[in-house]
Image (tube, rainbow, N blue to C red):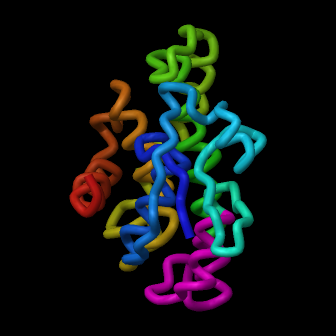
Amino acid sequence: MKLYSFPVAPNPARVEFYLAEKGIALEKVVVNLAEGEQQSPEHLARNPKGVLPVLELDDGRYLTESLAIIEYLEELHPEPPMIGSTPEERAFTRAYERFIELNILARIARYVHATNSPLGLAPNPVLAKNEMKFLTPSLEDLNTHLKGKQFVMGDRVSIADCTLLAGINFGRFRGWDIPAEHAHTKSWFENFALRHL
């Protein structure tokens, strides 16, 4: 199998953090988003949407969407479990990972592209303000959730940690940072980031 990726971008990054936590070694091919390589005929043949990541399977088919890639790899490599060991653990992990993806990772990504886009997009102050309006309460909820926890879902690393690190790391890459008053989130970041950054 082969992973087409661009490590700093949030969705490829969450897959790369997952691979590192699982100890899965895959051949990786960088598709440089900053240089527009995602729109090349070669990449569009892999994914007509022109986005990353893409997992090339051994039979030559291509799997897109970061969470689908993670869940596929989790089926192939169930140990250590990163979605959960019971139906309840899996349900709650998926639910919180989805909260992080939609309300934190995606909003940070849109905020960055509206303020300091690494792809050279024009600033959009209205969009940036709107994303921050909704990001702020989600970060407050996250900070409360992380109180007393080593990892997002408790005492074991999960896919939720990978998604959260990908979002926060992308923000920090372009000048956004965890609010100073969010001590539990800062503590989580300082500990988990040491494993990857």
Q: Which residues are magenta?
A: 68-93
Is 86 displayed left or right of 193 in the figure? Answer: right
Q: Residue at x 56, y 9 (%)?
A: 122
* Quadrant into which the N terminus falls: bottom right
Q: Main secondary structure of the magenta part?
A: helix
> Residue 23, located in which quarter of the rendered image?
bottom left
Q: Is residue 83 covered in magenta?
A: yes
Q: Residue at x 71, y 61 (%)?
A: 62
Is 178 displayed left or right of 107 in the figure? Answer: left
Image coords of residue 176 (percent x, y): 37, 28
Q: Nearer the viewer, residue 70 or 87?
A: 70
Question: With respect to residue 98, does 103 lie above or below?
Answer: above
Question: With respect to residue 197, does 132 lie above or below?
Answer: above
Image coords of residue 55 (percent x, y): 61, 61
Q: Nearer the viewer, residue 145 or 188?
A: 188
Q: Can residue 91 be seen?
A: yes
Q: Residue at x 59, y 51 (%)?
A: 53
